[in-house]
Amino acid sequence: MLIYNIIGTISNPNYKMQLIYEIKEHHKKIDCVAWAPNGNWIASASNKDHNIRIWDVSPHDSKVRENT
């Protein structure tokens, strides 16, 4: 799963995409992704590998960690 920060607007042909997270722990297709309202957590789910994963992406840490 790749998470990008879009700089500018997509409707502007000069927008830029900055990769901010790369999460590789799902072994099959990801079906759903949701951000927590505070922006510190991402939930990802896969019907194929039967997993729901919660990720700590809080700005105080440069590493993405799975919350188990």
Image: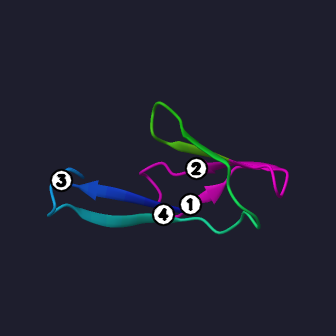
Mark 4 or mark 1, which has the lower sequence index?
4
* Percent of width and height locating residue 60: 43, 52
Q: Is residue 38 left or right of residue 28?
A: left
Q: Are marks 4 and 1 in contact (CB under 8 Å)?
A: yes
Which residue bears the numbered disc 2? 56
Q: Which mark is residue 64?
A: 1
Which residue bears the numbered disc 4? 21
Mark 4 or mark 2, which has the lower sequence index?
4
Q: Are marks 2 and 1 in contact (CB under 8 Å)?
A: yes
Which residue bears the numbered disc 3? 8
Q: Is residue 65 left or right of residue 17?
A: right
What's the residue type where badge 4 is placed?
Tyr
Q: Label 4 vs label 2: CA separation?
A: 11 Å
Q: Are marks 3 and 2 in contact (CB under 8 Å)?
A: no
Looking at the rendered structure, the secondary structure element under dot 2 is: strand
Q: Is residue 12 magenta?
A: no
**Dot 4 crowding, Cα within 10 Å, few <14, some 14–19, many 20+:** some
**Dot 3 crowding, Cα within 10 Å, few <14, some 14–19, many 20+:** few
